[in-house]
Image (cartoon, grey):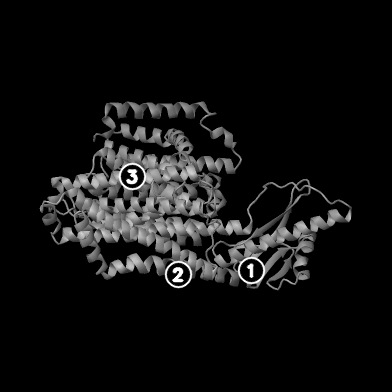
Amino acid sequence: MKKIFKFEAKQLLRDKKTIFFVFILPLIAFPLLNGVLSKVVSSQLEKIYERKATVLVERDSLAEEVLSQFNDAQDTTLVVEYVEKLGDLDSLLKEYTAAINIERDSTGFATFKIHYSAKNDKNSIKAKQISGKIYALRDSIRSERYQSIGVSEYEVSKKFDEFNTSTIEEMQNSKHSVMLPVSLILILMVGTFMISNYVILGEKDNNTLESLLASGVDRRDIIYGKLGIIFLAGILMSFLEMISFMVYGHFTGVFNFGISFNSGNIVLLLLLVISVTTLIASISVFISCKIKSSTAGQLLFMPIMIVYLLLTLLGTFEGVEIKRGLLFIPIINSAGIIKSVLVDKFVMLDSMIVIAANLAYSVFFINLSSSYLNSEAILKTDSNLKDSENTYSPAMVFTLFAILVVGYMLLGGYLQGKDIVSGLIYSQAGILGVFIVLMVRKNGGDYFKILKIRKFNPVYLLIALFFGLFARYPISIVKDGFFYFFPIPRIIESSDLLQTGLGDLNYWQLLAVISVLPALFEEFTFRGIFLYMLEKKYSLLKVSVIVGLMFGIMHLNVFTLLETALLGVLLTMITLRSGSIIPAIVFHFVNNAYSISVMKMIDDKTIDESTVSFLETDWMMYGSSVVILVLTVLIINGNIFKKE
């Protein structure tokens, strides 16, 4: 083991790429990049705040009283123009930063309504700044009025109350504490993966690993020797990253943390970093042992990076508490606990659990790697880039998926930010549609075969309709249980699609955008293209779970990942059982259409929101029970995982 360790160390120190990943990247590149980005964003925000803005205001005595104080305060960034009545807002907001009017209810209570266009980012930021100033001015006027009649203490009733007990410094510490674990784990992932790619996959490419394995050296010593050099490189990267962050933050003021640097906190932080370094190094070694070539490793790099990033961001997301089940989820637990230590929270017991879990996972992956090296599978020379059925390996499929996710996130997010309605249409028909066409043509051009547009037993149409109406409720039961053990904040539930530009559509237009398009393009993408590329590589149970998870990840919301993934699993199962994609399309359409119909009826006051709760509505509860019963019977009999 020592000989292998020394040999690998000498080879790595001669390699320029290693020098870059181990020394330059963590010491200079990452903190400098983050610092530059932070400075650029802050600078741009300051410029927007200082920019002069013209606001159109519907004439009203209260509005004039409040807004006149901008002039008294000599606020040169705001110009107010009054009109008797606001006209077409879309036209006005092309010329003005914001438009303001006041609405009064039956009791005379006045509400400021500030309108701005989300199509213009600068106007959105400026309008929110103006909004904050108006609230502050109105509170000042209220205070003056009460004081004029001798009232010094009073309580103001608001529809929404916000309480923030943190100081500005504490909020800055919390914000900055996210950056270190995110960049630290990404540094470890990139560095250890690249080094393991070099010391393991490089030997596979050169056919020297076989000679090493046949040389009589104990294979466990081989894996420990290679792991040791990757681990030490990771430790060095971690420490350089932390030092550079602290030094850079101290001299520039860009990064600061709330941690008090006593011996206990320092030791705890070091143990956490060492444990997560061990974990990531062992995962990198395991992946490198399992795949056949450096080409396959490079293909896997992007999807692995996306998974690492999502897990890290989830662990550091504001409001996420690392407790119960989250303590045992790799990467999430480490990122969240490191953040907690950086903001000086006392988490000794939780930290010890995370450290122990990381080390246990590391031992598990090391043993898997060692077992694989001790098997004869390592000596097989067939490439995993191709197989007899089609030209796509799992590595290539997951890389294609990662590229699609990144493209959908960037381009689709941009389009939807400009206009939610047209953005959704272009995202589905454009991004997913183009991907479907390209992949079908790449695989021979037979749309009916690849997309599974086939005849099927009509019974599955009835199952699809039934599941489309009721499957959401068993899924919600599983979700509620999951969130108990894995307490992720369910902030997404407070959002309302109809409060966006989608609210301007009539029912049939909404149905087309939210139900028809996803039912077609998402199903052709996942139950068509990806299922076609994966179904012959895995068992039906595995492929259902894999395609379901891909479907969940594609929706780009970690807080609803479980729901969409479970829905994706059911959609994949019904496709595999029926042999056709059509039942899945019907299932998907009915599921979305039901949600849209309920939201629209609630928004139109046709029904009360409480009437749609399956716990309070018998027929929904009965339907859910039937779904659970059918799934249970099929799983017990094993029929659910058999093709029709």
Which quadrant of the view contains residue 192? bottom left
Which quadrant of the view contains residue 636? top left
Q: Rounded to the nearest whole Å, what is the CA distance between mark 3 and mark 1? A: 57 Å
Of the numbered discs in the image, which one, if any, rests on residue 593?
none
Which quadrant of the view contains residue 118? bottom right
Q: Which residue was labeled with disc 3? A: 361
Residue 446 visible in the current orientation:
no
Q: Residue furthest right?
A: 149
Of the numbered discs in the image, which one, if any, rests on residue 32?
2
Whether tag 3 and tag 1 are in contact, CB under 8 A, the answer is no
Quadrant assignment for the N terminus? bottom left
Mark 3 residue type: Tyr
Mark 3 or mark 2, which has the lower sequence index?
2
481 and 535: which is toward the camera? 481
Task: Name the residue located 23 percent from the left edge and 48 percent from the top edge.
Answer: 369
Mark 3 or mark 1, which has the lower sequence index?
1
Q: Which residue was labeled with disc 1? A: 96
Element at label 2? helix
Element at label 3? helix
Q: x, y (%) of residue 165?
A: 65, 51
